[in-house]
Amino acid sequence: MKKTADVAILGGGILGVSTAFFLARHKPIRIVLFERDGLAQATTGLSVGGIRQQFSHPSNILLSQNTLAFFEFFQKEYGIPLCFHKVGYLFLAQKEDTWRDFLSSVQTQKRYNVPVEALLPDEIQRRWPYLNVADLRGGTFCPEDGYADPYEVTMAMAKIARQKGVNIFEQTEVTGVLVDKGKVSGVQTSRGDISVPIVINAAGPWSGNIGRMAGLHYPVFPYRRQVFVTKAFQEVAKPIPLILDFDSLFYFREEGPAILMGKSDPEEPSSFNVNVDRGFMETVIEAACHRAPILGSAKIAKSWGGLYTITPDENPIIGADPNIEGFYNAIGFSGHGFQHGPAVGQVLSDLIVHGSTAFDLTPFSSERFTKGPLHGEKRVV
């Protein structure tokens, strides 16, 4: 490892790798990336991989649209397909208040040319007859949404970043961020120290720790999520959209010949725990059998635990910190880091190289938490 660089990226998930990829397109910039484990082995690699335009907040809609455009660009530019499965997203609402929020979000989405439909229960059952719609008020569906393999996408971008000169150090723990007279001056790692004037905090669940190393305190907290995959299950007609039962926080989609499912737990405390809880698995199965009774005959084959990084308004923190020159963030994505990673990497690279970006980062400012009411994202599961 060399003793100096122009930019140090802390975190080897999709956000760190994407930022490295876009920065490397600007020459000459000496870029190093440090990852405490392996690339895309933690939060990114353990995510469900959804990519959707059905958000309530316009900025999140735009980030998703930019990511979808990037997928097309990447395949044309480098000849590497990223295998986006365009199966659609189906949001389901049980409560009247939820349904009203859905309809409000649909109006917002349509202003940004999202081809979303508002569906009543009878139409939902006609299209997806395996669903129980008896307790639903309605749902929304966008056929352009879907999912991709987070590990595959991250590794493809890392491959090109390396070819363009990015030095990636895996199994390297960051132990300190050096600040001198209000400016970033270097990074301490398990491989040694490096002098660098720009640090990008893209450490996911560990991003709060990175901030504290520089004397900064961000309201980002890790929360466990648990995912379960069945054995091969062919009883449901394909394609299966990514279905989110919003009021119960349950979701499922196809995973090859199997079904992937999970559920958020609003009672779960913040922690770095990624163990799978068998009792919670039974809760997920119960939710699955209620919403799609046919899943009652499926058998769980494997499971894993991962981490979301949550902020108080469930929107991320993106951009330069106003208190320390040279310190940037891409943190707190509340479960949307993979789908917004490529777009955020491009935004950050423009900000660092040109000093500005055309994308409005105001909703993602680190200062918003002390400036009055928060207007965050409502479509979070």
Image: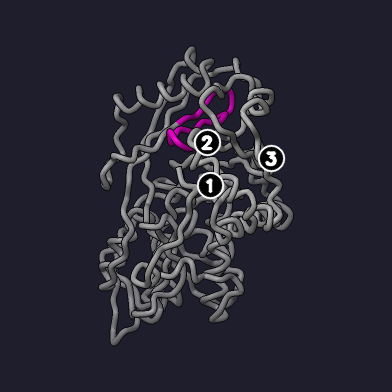
Give the dominant element type of the magenta stretch: helix, strand or loop: strand
Tell me the amino acid under the disc marked 3. Pro
Q: Which residue is mark 2?
A: 93
Q: Earlier in the sequence, mark 2 or mark 3?
A: 2
List x then y, in percent, for residue 121: 61, 28
User: Are the two marked residues, 1 and 3, in contact with CB atoms closer than 8 angstroms?
Assistant: no
* Residues shaded magenta: 246-261
Can residue 83 be seen here? The reply is no
- When the figure is inspected, residue 276 is found, relative to residue 111, above or below; the finding is above
Within 10 Å of the Cα at label 1, are there few (<14), some (14-19), or many (20+) other Cα atoms? some
Q: Amino acid at mark 1?
A: Asp
Q: Which residue is mark 1?
A: 101
Q: SS class of the residue under badge 2?
A: strand
User: SS for tag 1?
Assistant: helix
Residue 255, magenta (yes or no): yes
Residue most extreme to the front: 96
Number of other residues with Cα within 10 Å of mark 2, as a class: few under 14, some 14 to 19, many 20 or more:
many
Tag 3: Cα neighbours inside 10 Å, few (<14), some, or many (≥20)? some
User: Amino acid type of disc 2?
Assistant: Ala
In this picture the colour scheme is one colour
Residue at image mark 3: 143
